[in-house]
Amino acid sequence: MDITRYTTQLMQFRTELYQNITNRADTLLELLDAICSNPTATSVVELSQTACFRRSYSNLFKAIDEWQPAKMLLPHLLRPYLPTPRQRPFWLLLIDVTAQPRPYGHTVADRGMVYQPTMVKGNKPVTIGHQYSSVSLGLEPEAGLAPSWVLPLLVERVSSHQDKERVGGSQIDALLDDPQLPFGQELCVEAVDSSYSKPGYLHAHRRHPNLVTIVRAKSNRTFYHQFQPEAEPVKSSGHPTWYGQPFSLSNPDGRAAPDQTLTRWETSRRDHRYRIEIQAWHNMLLRGQRDAPMHHHPFTLVCITRYGQDGQPAFKRPLWLVVLGDRRDELSLQDIYLAYQARFDIEHFFRFGKQKLLLTQFQTPEVEREEKWWYLNHFAFAQLWLTRHLTVALPRPWERQLPAMKNRLISPTLVQRDFARIIRQLGTPAAAPKPRNISSGRAPDVKLPKRPRQPVVVKRNLRATAA
């Protein structure tokens, strides 16, 4: 392994980031290092006690307030270090939305009802807060690394009057329309969940000829074969016929034979042997809308069924995927299966960010500051990714017998544990703080007004209720 190469890449990334920060660059870079090297902090203000943060805790919040990040700064900084796909014939983009719970932020603007999983059976999985749409680059397996790595590229808050799928679509458009990034010139695949299977989202991305969309379909959907004039009677007048025989996912009776099949075997981490049956039907259609005519965009419908050692299905329902795009035929069934299987890696990023990077712990009444904190967290995870090959595994005594530790697989958690040592050896371009005179502070007779309490936006009945 060329340690010099990875050391140079990390130092170049940090230097370019430092040069692109206009206000309080020294404080922000030290805050970024504190996020990457302090896995035990329980609040954002505790990061000021990290050894690499040499300033007072008040400067932490001032730096976030004065920072004005550019939307495309992170992907442009990462462009020289993007790993070119070798095992896959395409770039893989992962999109998903996660929640920022703010149930007690009564003065925070634009809070709404957002999804939050609950451990108590029967409770509604909702809370009050914000939503953030994140786009990450799916990475190929790399020797010596845990398989849960992704590379975050963009993040944007979804306001209460926006559609989360349309926000994710605009982020993909920004990446593919940028001529300095490779995604717009080469074959690119986006893997998304079932909420993105709306005709509006699927139709909007068809202007990119090199983009293929892989989206999960709910098992109660109904699709259609393309209309075949030689097999069905043609109307002599009236509206032209676009859709042929229906294809119900919930009714296996009467389905046409698949156009393509594939069988593969997999062994789980618990040594359970599974048989994966993949079936595909080509040139299928879904009903569109007035502003999203989907009859112009046929797709490939893929059914994935997992069978256990006893020959019975391992899950109650099969997995249905819609593969849409002009270049979809360039993907094999195995490429489609593995690409969607990698979609779950973005969930590992969200989990690590919330547990270790304090992604949802910045409690501020200003929505703009909260957005900047999310953006800074994406920079922190990208910096951990650039440090992956410089890390020495430091397992806890009770972790030494875990399979990942025995195989020395470097995960984001292990990189965060060793990041402080790496930064001490490499140094930082941030200048040391200079002592100033004690500020006079606020005048004694100044009294700030109370912040107004903001309503909670409820979309269901289009009205707002007090928090």
Image (tube, rainbow, N blue to C red):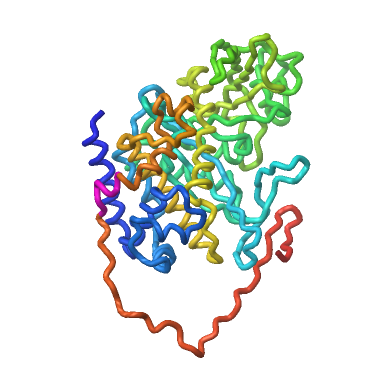
What is the x, y in percent for residue 432?
26, 63
User: Can you name the residue that lies furthest to the left here?
Assistant: 4
What is the x, y in percent for residue 437?
31, 79
At 61% from the left edge and 19% from the top edge, which residue is drawn? 304
Confirm whether the magenta stretch covers residue 297.
no
At 51% from the left edge and 35% from the top edge, which residue is drawn? 206
Choose between 180 and 284: the one closer to the eye: 180
Q: Which residues are magenta?
A: 422-428
Is 6 located above or below residue 428 in the figure? above
Image quadrant in which you'd find residue 139:
top left
Left or right? Give the position of 335 relative to 99.
Answer: left
Choose between 230 and 350: the one closer to the eye: 350
Image quadrant in which you'd find residue 347:
top right
Q: Is residue 93 visible?
A: yes
Choose between 27 and 293: the one closer to the eye: 27
Confirm whether the magenta stretch covers residue 427.
yes
Left or right? Give the position of 4 relative to 52.
Answer: left
At 21% from the left edge and 36% from the top edge, which residue is drawn? 4
Choose between 166 and 283: the one closer to the eye: 166
At 54% from the left edge and 53% from the top edge, which residue is drawn? 360
Q: How many marks?
A: 0
Left or right? Give the position of 255 relative to 91.
Answer: right
Q: Quadrant of the image for the C terminus?
A: bottom right
Q: Is residue 82 visible?
A: no
Q: Quadrant of the image for the N terminus?
A: top left
Is 360 located above or below residue 190 in the figure? below
What is the x, y in percent for residue 423?
29, 48
